Image (cartoon, coloured by chain):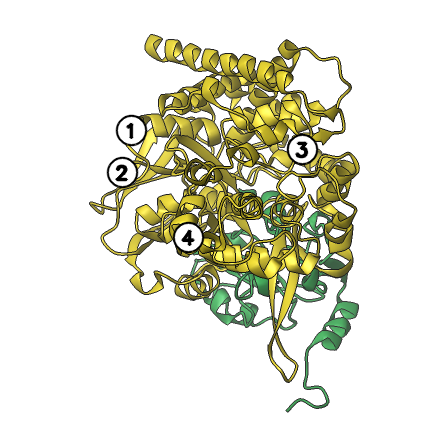
Chain colours: A green, B yellow
Amino acid sequence: MKILTAPRMERCIGCHACSLACARLVHKRLSWDTAGIRIRSSGGLSTGFEARTCLACDPAPCVRACPTGAYSQRKGGGVVVRKKLCIRCGECARACPVDAIYLDVGGEPYVCIHCGRCVSYCPHDCLEYRQSSTAAADRANETPGLGEGEE
Amino acid sequence: MIRDHFRVLRVDLSSGQKIVTDLDGRNRVAGGSGLAAMLFEKYGALDRPWNDPGQPLIFAIGPLTGYFPLMSKTVCAFKSPYHDQYAESHGGGRSALSLRFADYDALVITGRAAVPSALIVGSRWLEVRDIHYLWGTDLQVAGKVLRRMFPGAGHRTILRIGPAGERQSPMACITADTYRHFGRLGGGAVMGAKNLKAIMIHGDGSFALPEGREYVKVFEKVHADLTATDMMSKYHNLGTPVNVAGLNAIQALPVRNLQATTDPAAAGITGERFAEVALLRNAACAGCPVGCIHIGFVRERFQEENRYLYRQISYDYELLFAVGSMLGVMDCFEVLKLIDVAEKMGLDVVSPGVALAWATEALSRGIVTEKETIVPLAFGNSIAYQGALQHLALGTNEFYQLLSRGTMKAAERYGGADFACVLGQEMAGYATGPTFFVSQALGLRHSHLDAGGYAYDQKPKGKSVEEAVNFLVKDEKERVLLTSLVACLFARGVYNAEVLGNCLKSLGYLRLADNMDAVAGDIQRLRWRMRIGTGFRPEEVSIPKRFSEVTTVQGPVDRQSIEALKAAYAQAIIGLAEESRGESSER
């Protein structure tokens, strides 16, 4: 199974094309909020941008938190959401450790479904749609740790 | 949201009253430039001064804002402190999408707050907050504090002013999101006069899209045209600074107060040179995948022991010309330092650069002395210009107070009007010839973007005055349509009439799509009626002698051709305004 990753966010210019594409194509909305990937500046524009999107956890804390079974584990990481079963309680968003789930005014959750449709809209190739095992290994390598000389 | 009317938020800072109003007019004025003029007519007073508390400060977006790529600009309209007449200034950043997602077509601010304040707008949030403790702060400090005070990082715009705006300098800009500006004609002073330090717009709304596949299909086509072809590569690659080398090569780069139109030393400030040594990264306005914003850096050694700080500064062609070639400062990093000073003070960069170029020549001719200029202005002396920009922002003495009201104001007092590079306001960076000079001098915004006079000048000779006037009127009309929808004018090559029609139809704006040409004409005439109604006399505009002393790509500029074109274009503008008066009385 493939998942969406955002391995090159240092290149991001903050155009929001990915969020707008997700909202437009997946959720049929005009929005930069009701989308599975959302861009925010990390403390002002001079410090660059970060993507709020699902990291494809397996097991996913949001699945465990969902009281109705609306969330289920997606093979390869991430979740499948059946909105008909959702009671808008917001437990999924509270359980997500990386703030990847957006709740709209009515409490409806929006989370990445790992379809990869946003990828082609990024003008700087920040995003990548790839096999989940590779993605997990790469992410482990990207995780910043303490280097020599740091304390 | 798609609607056949306008949803306008009106805030009166004097009374604290806030009203959401639905207004008709979508099929008549579209939005953006058209909507701003309509709102000024409704809420402004043609005959009262710019700083009368009742005068409106207007921000307007259009029907396509956010729905299509590069529909990413906001039109700001006000009565300008520069000439006390109707003015428009356009800006991007996240302002347009934030206003869209806050679910307003326009914001109209009147009155004057009792204490320095911030206006906070969202789809479910409306507040005026006392922020007197930020009055006097430079834009860097204000930006940091304001970001911490309000939620919505990434999905909001913060419009703010610096000390120049607080002082109500006609050269004060409104800064949007650090790197973009409503730069010219003194919008920052209008905020200052309203005791309004900042406007935070949180774009926290979300809207259903039209049913069916048509919208997504049209979007895909436009997106492909804008990104898959090389049409936008100029802006994506070196950005607008690519113009430095190009204009220098054809003798159209204003150098040292337009004493020359080319200089080999300009090689030090070309787009290529910036990309090589000073370009740090790029950024984009929200909703624009082109990302034309080019950000350079300066570092400053603040201790002997190799201790440095650094700052990131956006640069564009207009800035490089104004505080680069025009001041004889031909080094990337020195230019960035000057932009940085202006940025922190909340000054526009173009007008101050051109004004200081005049002041430099005035000092060298003995028209003014160092008693007036305080610092030893000399072409190439960037340290002196850093000081002068601060004096200009703060109005340190009478000379700088006058100069910040416009070069001509200073020239009226001290002399030197012949070499003041003023075309309605301080010139834009195109010494291409008579068509541009007349186009900016008489243009509604006094901007090179009012009409493509600079491009017309570069075409082969043999054009009649009538042809040139027809070109300017027609080109302005086409641009006015774009700025009413509201497109970034960099995308004008993609957004032709057919594409715009398809975009409007895909959102259900069928009447607008079918009447675009007539609507554009109506808007063009309405804007001119506002401008002339507030005192503009196009027939009285004079173009200083310096502009007929230059040699351009077409050879020496002929004074007679400037005068003939100016007279004919002035009559055309008066005609447009009169037609609009007739239309107005019929309604």
Image depth: mark 3 or mark 4 in front: 3
| Mark 2 and mark 4 on one chain | yes
- Amino acid under label 2? Asp
| Side of B439 where B127 appears, left or right | left
The residue carrying mark 1 is: B45
**In contact (CB < 8 Å): disc 1 and disc 2:** yes
Of A15 and B195, nearer the camera is B195
Q: Secondary structure at mark 3?
A: loop
Mark 3–mark 4 CB contact (< 8 Å) = no
Q: Position of residue A142 (x, y in %)?
A: 72, 74
Looking at the image, tell me whether mark 2 or mark 3 is earlier in sequence order: 2
Depth check, front residue: B483 or B31: B483
- What numbered label is drawn on residue B52? 2
Q: Chain of mark 4?
A: B
Q: Between residues B338 and A106, which one lies in front from this camera angle?
A: B338
Residue shown at 67%/33% (left/top)?
Answer: B431
SS assignment at label 4: helix
Choose the circle earlier in sequence order: 1 or 3.
Answer: 1
> Mark on residue B165?
none
Q: Quadrant of the C terminus of chain B?
A: top left
The answer to whether residue B34 is left or right of residue A142 is: left
Q: How many marks?
A: 4
Which amino acid type corresponds to the residue marked 3 in the rendered image? Ala
> What's the residue at 40%, 61% (across, down)?
B150
Q: CA distance from mark 1 to mark 3?
A: 36 Å
Residue holding disc 3: B431
Q: Nearer the viewer, residue B503 or A58?
A: B503
Q: Which residue is mark 4?
A: B164
